[in-house]
Every structure is written in structure tokens, then in C-alpha cells.
């Protein structure tokens, strides 16, 4: 399998990158917990029902620990933690929990190792990429998940039409 890349043209006229062609990851659907349970069952001795129970409980447990102001590390996946956006107040005594905190959000830090002096994220180790064939296409929901037609390319991907693994560079 490969990560499909879809070409798109930046149509945002105020952008420095207007008219340039870029690539973005094409998502060909969403995998639900039941399909993941089938994949996991094929790799171990646990039953599908046991896997569904554990994975369902995982979400509840992660939420509970995040609410206790703890980081949650899941091997081979990464670490979750909570962050906040706040207003800056002129004086420390003006900062208050109700008015100064704008929102709370989840921060995900992928599992990363250092190999040959380069940081490599576990979830993209050994990735292969191919250009999205025209017959597969994307529906609008998947295209919106990929960021619409805004801005330029903020990653330096190489690859595209071949099956060579891509190394993660720092």
C-alpha cells in the first residue's frame, strides 16, 4: 500500500504561491474501530470482542488522565497532552481562569526516534507514496480534510509516482 498524493493548484490570488501546483495527502475514507479490531485480531491471539472492549475503554482512560493534567504516552503512536490558548493580561492579578483562558485543545506528539542523526516519526517510517490515480478521485469531505485550496506547500516531499521509501528529515 501507499499514501496517495493528489495534485492541486493554489487558487488563492493573494498568495505568493498563486498558480503553483502542489501535492497533498489524499484520504480515501475513514477506518472505524471495528475494522481496526479485525486488523489487530489478525496480528495477535486476542479476540475481536476483547479488542473492541479495550480500545473503547482506551479513549475514556486517555480523557480521564488528560483531565488530571497528565501526558498520555502510547508506544509506537505518540503522546497526548492538553494545551490552552490564553489572553495576555497586563498584570498577573488580572489573569483569571474564567476570562483569560480562550480554549483548551489536544496536542499530539508522534512517537519519534533519532536514527543516523535524523528524527524519524514512527507513524511515517518506511512510507511509500504514489500519485492518486484519476479513477479513485476524492469526495468533497475528504478534500476538505486535506486543507482545501489554501496556501502553499509547507512540507518538502519528494517522491510522488514511485515506490521508494521516503526518509523523514529533521
Image (spheres, helix red, strand yellow):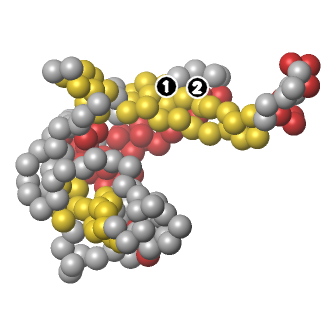
**Residue 143 location in percent, x, y?**
41, 69
Residue at 58% from the left image edge and 25% from the top image edge: 65
* Residue bearing mark 1: 72
- Residue farthest to the bottom, as pictured: 135
Say above or below: 4 vs 141: above
**Residue 167 location in percent, x, y?**
17, 38
Q: Residues within 10 Å of mark 1 (few under 14, many from 20)?
A: some
**Residue 51 location in percent, x, y?**
35, 41
Q: Quadrant of the C terminus?
A: top left
Q: Secondary structure at mark 1?
A: strand
Report whether residue 28 is seen: no
Q: Is residue 110 left or right of residue 120?
A: right
Q: Is residue 68 left or right of residue 14?
A: right
Q: How many marks?
A: 2
* Residues tagged 1 and 2 counted as in contact (Cβ below 8 A): yes
Q: Nearer the viewer, residue 20 or 109?
A: 20
Q: Nearer the viewer, residue 51 or 72?
A: 72
* Residue bearing mark 2: 65
Q: Quadrant of residue 43?
A: top left
Amino acid at each position: 500500500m501507499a499514501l496517495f498524493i493528489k495534485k492541486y493548484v493554489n487558487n488563492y490570488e493573494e498568495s505568493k504561491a498563486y498558480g503553483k501546483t502542489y501535492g497533498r495527502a489524499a484520504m480515501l475514507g475513514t477506518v472505524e474501530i471495528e475494522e481496526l479490531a479485525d486488523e489487530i485480531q489478525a496480528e495477535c491471539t486476542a479476540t475481536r470482542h476483547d479488542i473492541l472492549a479495550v480500545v473503547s475503554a482506551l479513549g475514556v482512560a486517555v480523557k480521564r488522565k488528560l483531565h488530571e493534567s497528565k501526558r498520555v504516552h502510547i508506544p509506537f503512536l505518540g503522546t497526548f497532552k492538553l494545551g490552552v490558548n490564553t489572553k495576555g493580561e497586563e498584570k498577573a492579578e488580572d489573569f483569571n481562569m474564567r476570562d483569560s483562558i480562550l480554549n483548551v485543545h489536544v496536542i499530539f506528539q508522534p512517537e519519534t526516534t533519532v536514527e543516523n542523526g535524523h528524527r524519524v516519526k514512527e507513524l511515517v517510517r518506511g512510507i511509500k507514496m504514489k500519485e492518486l490515480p484519476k479513477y479513485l478521485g476524492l469526495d468533497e469531505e475528504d478534500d476538505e480534510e486535506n486543507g482545501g485550496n489554501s496556501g502553499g506547500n509547507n512540507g518538502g516531499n519528494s517522491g510522488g509516482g514511485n515506490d521508494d521509501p521516503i526518509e523523514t528529515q529533521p
